[in-house]
Image (cartoon, rainbow, N blue to C red):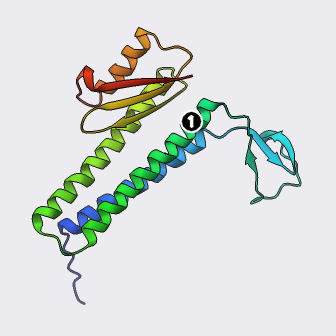
């Protein structure tokens, strides 16, 4: 009986990390999507609620979310989708660069560092958004970069206490100066 020798190199670790990162992004997207489903459903050209969908509706039939979304809800949905798409594209670019095969060890180290940075940034953004929602904000988006952070919150009025909550949630996850933090309110 032959023994199977498995050699795990840096390339395999980075590919596994990017796969886990992509899986985490899909899980976050699914979780966010499941939490934000609206109850208005359009079935057979009649607006109904999901609890009163007609018995004639079959699994797999097309249904549409009510078009009565507020402007701010639509903004957050689009922004979240754009953010996810840009992160997915960045992960694909990094994976493509790594799988190119003609990179030096220094270039591979840079790609690995960029992949880890992207993963860390995505995790931090997710944690910050979750904390802000737990603190009572209706919705929140966080964009972290090397130069600072942009936080967008849905609220009816942002006062000094609300801004302090946002900064506290942000600074509990990342180290930034007050000058590099931007808070945007969406009503």
| Residue depicted at x 39% and y 21% | 166
Where residue 177 appears, as percent x and y from the top left, is 23, 23
Query: Does 124 sit above or below residue 64?
Result: above
Does residue 185 appear left or right of residue 58 in this picture? left
Residue at image location 15% in from the left, 59% down from the top: 109
Q: At which x and y percent is residue 186?
A: 53, 25
Mark 1 highlights which residue? 75
Quadrant of image for the C terminus: top right
Q: Quadrant of the N terminus?
A: bottom left
Above or below, 77 against 106 in this view is above
Residue 126 position, x and y percent, is: 40, 38
Quadrant for residue 107, please give it. Answer: bottom left
Q: Is residue 105 left or right of residue 63?
A: left
- What is the total number of numbered labels drawn onto the structure image? 1
Which residue extends farthest bottom? 1
For mark 1, give the secondary structure. helix
């Amino acid at each position: 009986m032959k023994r199977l020798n498995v050699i795990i190199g840096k390339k395999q670790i980075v590919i596994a990390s990017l796969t886990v990162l992509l899986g985490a992004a899909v899980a976050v997207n699914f979780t966010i999507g499941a939490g934000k489903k609206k109850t208005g459903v359009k079935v057979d050209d009649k607006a109904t609620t999901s609890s009163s969908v007609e018995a004639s509706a079959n699994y797999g039939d097309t249904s549409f979310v009510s078009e009565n979304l507020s402007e701010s809800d639509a903004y957050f949905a689009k922004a979240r989708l754009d953010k996810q798409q840009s992160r997915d594209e960045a992960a694909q670019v990094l994976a493509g660069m790594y799988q190119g095969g003609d990179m030096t060890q220094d270039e591979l180290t840079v790609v690995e560092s960029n992949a880890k940075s992207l993963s860390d940034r995505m995790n931090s953004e997710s944690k910050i958004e979750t904390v802000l929602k737990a603190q009572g904000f209706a919705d929140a988006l966080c964009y972290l970069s090397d130069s600072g952070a942009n936080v967008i919150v849905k609220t009816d009025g942002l006062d000094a206490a609300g801004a302090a909550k946002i900064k506290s949630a942000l600074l509990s996850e990342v180290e930034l100066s007050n000058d590099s933090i931007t808070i945007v309110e969406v009503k």
